[in-house]
Each structure stands twice: as C-alpha cells, then as structure tokens.
Amino acid sequence: MENVIIIVSLIIFLYFLVMGQYISSAMLFVGIIGIFWLGGIDLLNGFLRSEAFTRTASYSLTTIPLYILMAQFIMQAGIVKDLYSLMYTLSRGKPGALGIMTILLGGLLGGVSGSGTATSAALGQIAVPELKKRGYPDHLAGTIAASAGSLSAIIPPSVVLILYGVVAQISIGKLFTAALIPGILLMVSFSIMTLIYLHLNRHEMKEVSKEFVPDHVPVSRYLIVTILGSAMGISIFGGIYTGVFSPTEAGAVGAFIALLIALLLKKVNLEFIKSSLVETTKITVMAMFIVIGASLFGRFISLSLVPRKIIDLLGPLLDTPTLVILIIMIFYFFLFMFIEGVAVILMTVPIITPILDTIHADPLWFGIMLTVVCTIGMITPPVGISVYAVGSVSNISIESLFRTSTVFALGASVVVIGLLIIYPELVTWLPNQMK
Amino acid sequence: MKTIIKVNDFFRTFGVYISGLAIFAMMWIIVIDVLMRNIFNKPLVGTYEIVQYYLMPLAIFPALAFAYWSGVLPRLSELISKLPEGVQRFHRWLILLVELLVFTLMTYYGFLFALSGLQESMAIPVGGKLLLVWPVYFLVPIGFFFVLVEVIFRLMKQSSAKGEVNV
Amino acid sequence: GKSESEGSTSGNGGKALKLRASSGVPDKHFWHRGMFEPLTTTVSEETDGQVQFEVFTAGELVGLGNEMDALTSGSIDVALTLMPPYDPQRFPYSEVVMLPLLESDAIIAAEAMGKLMKSDQEIKDGKTYYELEYTDKGLVAFSTPVTEPYLFSTTKHKFDNVGEFNKAIRVRTASRVHEMLAKELGITGQSMPITDAYDALSRNALDGIIYNSPDWIAFGLDELIKYSITGVNFGHFAGATAMKESTWNKMTEEQQNIFTEKADEYLMTGSQLTNSETEENIAANEAKGGEMLPFDQLNPEVQKHLETAIVNVWKVWIDDLESQGHAGKEIALLWRDLLVEAGAQLPTEILELK
Ligand code: NA
Ligand code: NA
C-alpha cells in the first residue's frame, strides 16, 4: 500500500509540475495528500500546523534575505554596469579576450546574485550585442552569456548552496568556501570551450569590423568602483576568515557595506531603499515559499520510508561507494536536465542524505558536486533556464543555442566532474584552511 | 467589489513593506551586534533570538501574498503552453482549485497553531528571561489567508475571463 | 510509579501496535546507542512483536526541540527526545538538572534523576515533580540517560586570575541556566546550535564553550579546546522519552511494565555508557594539546569566584521560578538532596540552603 501511495503521489506531483503549477504549491499539495493518505487527518494536522513557522524561524536562513539584499544594493548602485563597461574598455578589440571577459564577468556578477536566470538575462542584454559586434556568431555569443550566467548557481552566494546547506544540515559558510575552486574550474572550462569555438569560427570572424568604440565613463569612476568593490570583497572574506563575524552574519555585513558604497556613490534615496527592499522581499519570500513546500514534501518522503527502501535496493552496491555516487550523479544529471535546480535539490536531498551517510560520503563534497551538475544543467536541453533567459532577451533561437551550449556542458562536465572525483581536495582544501 | 480589491491592494503593499523593513532591521541589528562585540566587547543580548523568532517570520509571512501575486514564484510553463487552449483552460481551473484547497488548509492549520501558542502563552528564553513569542504565530494564518484571497481573485477573474490569466 | 497507579487494561486486542517514534539526535549519539535503540528493540522483542516502533532519527521527522508540539498534534506517537530543559515556559521545573555543582558524574546524576521522576514529595499544589511536568500535560515520560558534567572550556584563557572573567570572553551556552551562570561569572553567554560551535571556536568568534566532554570528538571540539576546568560541574542534561497517556493506554499492562522496566534500566546503562566515553574524549583532547585544570588547583580567588557564581545561580534560578509563581525552592532542594544522596558534592552554602 505504501508503495502505491508513493508512486501515485509522485506521479501527481510531476503532472502538476509539468502542467505549470507553481513548484512550491505543487510540493505543498503533494505533501498534504501524501501525508493524509499515509496517516489520515490526525497526521496531517500534526505536520501542517507548525511546519511553516518552524521552517521560517531560523537564524541560519537569514543568509537568504541578507545576501539578496547585498546583491540588490550592489545592482541598484550601478556598480555592475560600470564593471562591464570597464571590462569592455580593457579588452580593446580582442575577440577572444572579450568572450573570456564575459565569462569572468558572469562569475563576478554571479558573486553578487543568487539567481542564474537574472544574471543570464542581464548578460543576454549587455554582452550578447557587444559580442556580436565583435564578430561572434549568434549561437556562440548567446551560449557564452548563458554559461556565464549559470555560474551564479555555484559562485557564492548561491541559493542552491544555501538550500542544500539547510536541507543537509551543513554550514553554509563552509559550502560557500568549498564552491570557490570548482566555480573557478567551471569558468576556466567555459573559457577554453570559447577559445576552441573561436578557433573553429576564425574565418567568419575576420570578415567582421574590428572597430573599437570605447564607452565614455570617466576613469575616476572606474577607480572608485574597483577600489570599493575590492574593499568589499576583502572585508567580507577577511571578516569571515579572521572570525570577526560568521559566514551567516557576513550577509548582513556585506549588505551594510554595499549600502555604504551606494551612499558614497550618491545613489541612495528613498526610491533606492524602497525598490531594494521590495525586490529583496519578493525573491526571499519566493525562496521561502519553496523551502516551506519542500519541507512538507520532505516530511512526506520521510514518512513514506522511501530513503530506507532505496538504501535497501542499493544494498548490494553499498560496498562500492564510488559506484553509488556515480549512479546518483547520472540520476541527477537527468533530473537537472528536466527540472529547475532548486526544486530538484529540495525534493531529493532528504532522500539522498541517508544514503550518503550509509556509504560514508562527505556531504560537503557531495553538495559541491551536486551544485556543479546543477550549474551545468542550466544550459542543457530540454529545460535550461539560463539558455531560455538569454534566448528570450536576445531573440536568438533556443534550438541553435542548445546545440552549442550542450557541447559547452559536456566539455565542462567531463573536465570539472572528472577532476573533482579524482582530486576531492579541490573541494575540501579551502574550507579546511578556515581556522 | 471594487472596494474589496482596493482594500486587498492596500494590505498586499502594506505586507511587503512590513517584510522589507524586517529585513532591513535584520541587517542593522546583526551589524550592530558585530560592531558591539568586536569594538566594545559587549554583544547585543538577544540578537540571535530576536532575529530568529521575530524578524524572520516578519520578513516572510506578511509578504506571502505579494510574492504570490507578483508572479515571481517559479513554475514550468514550456509544455503547457504548447497544448491546445481547451486543455490549458482546464488545467488553469484545476490548478486554481488545488491552490484553493492548499491555502485554505494552510490558513486553517496556521490558525490552530497560533491558537495553541496563545493558549500556552508560548515564550522563549532570552538572556535568562522569558520573551513572549506567540503573537508572532498569528502572522502564519494571516499571511496564508491573504494568499488565499489572491487565489479567490484569480478564480473569479478566470470565470469571467476571455484571455490568459497568469496562474 | 506510573504503571502501577494507572492500571490500564484496555490493551490492543491482539493486533500489533505500531508506534512512530522520533529522535532529534543522530544514531551515533549516546542517547540513541544507550537507550533509544535498545529500548525500541527489546520492547518489541519482549512483547513478541505486539509493540513495534518506526524510529526516525536526527530530526528527520521532527526537529530537536519541536517534539512537544509534534506529540500533541499527533505527528508522532513517541517523542524519544522531548527536551523539557529547553522549554522552561511549559516545563519550568526540568531546568533544575542544569544547575551547577561541584563533583558528580553521569551515573550519580542518573540515579538522582531516576529518583526525581519517581519522587512522591509534593512540590506544589499537592503535586509531585512528575505530576507537574508530565501528568498535568497528559504525558507518560521516562528520563533519557543523563549527560556527563558540562565542563567550562576555553581556547586560550587559562583562568589564572579573576580578571580573566570579563565580558570579552564569549562562551557558547546551551540553556537559560547557563545564561544565568555566564552573567554571574561576568562573561558573555552566546546561544548557538552546537553544530556551529566548531566553526565559531576555530575562527575565534567564540572563546569558550560549556559542554559535556563525551561529545567533544563528535563535534571536533577536542581539536580546539585548550583549557578545561574539571571538578566543577556546570550542570547535567537529561531529556525525556515521552508519549501521550492515550498512546500509553493502547498497551496492555504487561507491555507497559516491560516498557517501564526497560526504560529504567537503560537510563542507568545509557548513563554508564556516556560516562565510560569520557576518558577517551579527554585523552583525545590532551593528545592534541588540551589541558585539564582541576578545580582545587586553581588560584584560590578563581575558585572562590566560581563557587560564588554557582551558589548565586541557584538563588537567581529559585527567585526567577518563584517570581513566576512556581515552587522554585522546593524543587531545587529536592534535587539537591537527591544529588547528595547519590554521592555528588555541592558548595556548602547550597547544602545549607533551607
Ligand atoms: Na551566486
Ligand atoms: Na537542463
């Protein structure tokens, strides 16, 4: 009977998901019917009452609103626009450089944004026209923007990492530190893929004009933005590293510094505060809607004993942990192909953590692997939200984008995932230095 | 009807400002705590508890309806948009009815939760003293109630609708 | 005693009773190894499978500290880790176990705890401790194994003189009583989940911790702690394994007796288990450069400072309870007497309290 309940509930869940119900509502709905089906109204009563409040009243979840607030202050202060313009000016007419710069910028932008969709859309608007002007073919310009945008899923702060930390009960600060090297590896792989593609397209590119039109931004402004930006980065990481504040508190400190910078740039007025706060609230509540939905869904998964059943199924394989990890990763690769990253994590991590526990896998390393797969999943068909975002703002056909982005994804998968499996220290070394 | 819509618009905007201010306050209180701790060796007592039990719920529940209304909640729209209009219309109805059920339950059980908190006059220990926490519990049913109102508005629009409604 | 007075005969008519039991600690915790695992297994065996448990650990189903609501709302049948000391609003008397003393260990405290649960001494309104805390709430409860003493440890302060106790020292505290203690010592108490303590200590965001040594290795604290005072005990901790009376009455009297007998047995053996793990944890800490500072070898002024703080915490706590209309004095004196009877040492001034 339990198996029937699980299977039918999961089918209902997928059905409503595909039919366009909000992910958060679909999880709430299936959590409700699943728990009701398993234990009647009494059991439902128990979980439905307190779940929303107990999930929300959490100090460690303050990272969600505070990192988003920091990002909002930075965006609203116009620092990002100046930074892109600086990159463009510095790259003076070299096509390869500008492509790599765009990926770097994606990484930097990703560093202040939790959302891959937002970054991809921004890059689609700013970078794609510039790249095309330099002779980049549509599909390549779009793919560069999409893959650069996807980086925000792994470069901290990242909603994916925050939610994984919450569900798997791991320090979010450690996850953030651990994600840095893999994030850089992804940037390097995307850059190499760009250079290879440029080489293959070199004949088309020569025909395009190489006229360089610099932006008219005063150098002093570049200087201010660079200094303030570095000061901010240094104080946040320095503060965490020396123990002046915790990684959780770093969100608040970062937001505060960003507010100070905006003040120095004379950008702060009532409208600035108002729109920053409203935008922050909107994104925060969106994330928390999903957290609450996923939490109830997770309770249903626990009650149904699915994780234990899967462990029993995997029983014969548990002696070869690498094989189990590989199977899990392939499974995730397909999930991320079809479903949005955050939803996948919240749905599956409650099932996966007991398995990791059984095979003694490091949940920190696993979380980073998962995030790499998730990042790559944002540029693979059929559901690749970074590609969709770029496509929708740049009018490049999704199909042509996917043809190139899938090659980028495959290249990055082989290089980065391979390296992380062979050298797990790439993940664990940096957080271990935090002493 | 117009009055109801106006009143609801007011509460929705009011809610998002309350939540926004709670987030802003969260930033300040944590920054002040960090400063007091590191400069004056005197941390702000109760920062942890006040942020966790007061500011986090305040940052989320009042703005639930706003987030729901704003269309920011993620959903998969690719497949459904390729299906015939009749199928789409059927699913818009089906999904809205499901949401009606879900948020009715969330409101009802949230209310029971708040009531039991009131009856037991729930409090948390802060710096050796007990601080009342049950009033915050009432944000849960209030927050979900306004989401329910948004769902009902969409249902009414849907029944009188000609074109696309953002479900 | 519980089962005698209830004399339930309702039973469950030959159909196996399946109870959903939730623990907020991982299965490696001594509560689980010392009590929850053997208790659920043997009860199920000795009732010939008539009482079965579906055990959820590590807060998978209900987070640690949320068990009371989960019990009353029916999410779970058995709360393996009900945490009365964390919930002074609803369980005002259970904090008493956290009051600081001088010399004792888990076994001594478990003996006192077992007697406290069964004590027929009236505390308030003609009711015993057990009746006030559990019967009044419709619960049937058993004490979990008791922790070893909570030790005061720091990463760099050696407690050479009283001046070292100042506001700049930030110490992770686990409860309201610890907060009172921090205040009396003149240091800064900081509440945070124990899982964050390693991080905070390693980054200098925290200078010390009040914690029971058998859990040091599990949280990596043995690597970070430099100095710990032994021979002065900043309290014990015990949770409760509880269920609603209506759930309890679904068992036959015989099954109830088995459960009671086993729970009482594992309270003691579980406490012995954690006691037996103290040595290896302290050894691990010492191997990594940690140093134990026996109380009686400290600077006499520091000894005095600590002892005064301990005595004052008892008084502050009693006053706090009395001011809320609870019988703070009665419960504190009962707990003191049970501790002394079991072999614990307390400051003279507390022994003289009347
Ligand atoms: Na990011
Ligand atoms: Na994908």
Image (tube, rainbow, N blue to C red):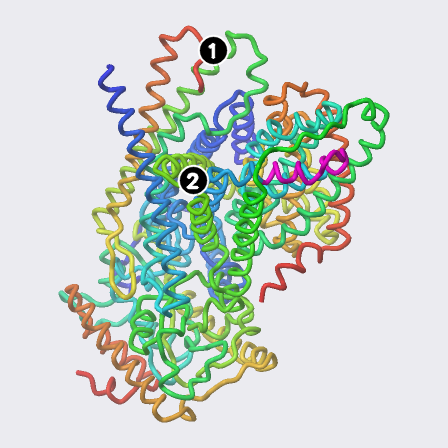
Q: Which three-letter amino acid code belongs to the residue tagged 2?
A: Lys
Q: Residue at x 76, y 49 (%)?
A: A419
Q: Is residue C209 left or right of residue A143?
A: left
Q: Chain of mark 2?
A: A
Task: Say if mark 2 contacts mark 1, CB within 8 Å.
Answer: no
Can residue A348 be spotted in the picture?
A: no
Query: Which x, y percent locates residue C116?
Result: 29, 72
Q: Residues within 10 Å of mark 2 (few under 14, many from 20)?
A: some
Q: Which of B102 and A44 lies nearest the eye of the viewer?
A: B102
The quadrant of the rendering that contains the C terminus of chain C is bottom left
- Identify the residue position indicated by label 1 in the image: B89
Question: Mark 2: which secondary structure?
Answer: loop
- Identify the residue position indicated by label 2 in the image: A267
Q: Which three-letter amino acid code belongs to the residue tagged 1?
A: Arg
Q: Chain of mark 1?
A: B
Query: Which x, y percent locates residue A122?
Result: 57, 31
> Based on the displayed image, in which of its 4 quarters is residue A305 positioned?
top right
Can residue A255 be spotted in the picture?
A: yes
Q: Is residue A409 left or right of residue A207?
A: left
Q: Which of A252 and A294 lies nearest the eye of the viewer?
A: A252
Q: Residues within 10 Å of mark 1 (few under 14, many from 20)?
A: some
Seen in the picture, residue C204 relative to A176 is either above or below; the reply is below
Residue range of the region highlighted in magenta in the rendering:
A83-99
Ligand 1, image quadrant it occupies: top right
Query: Which x, y percent locates residue B25?
Result: 34, 48
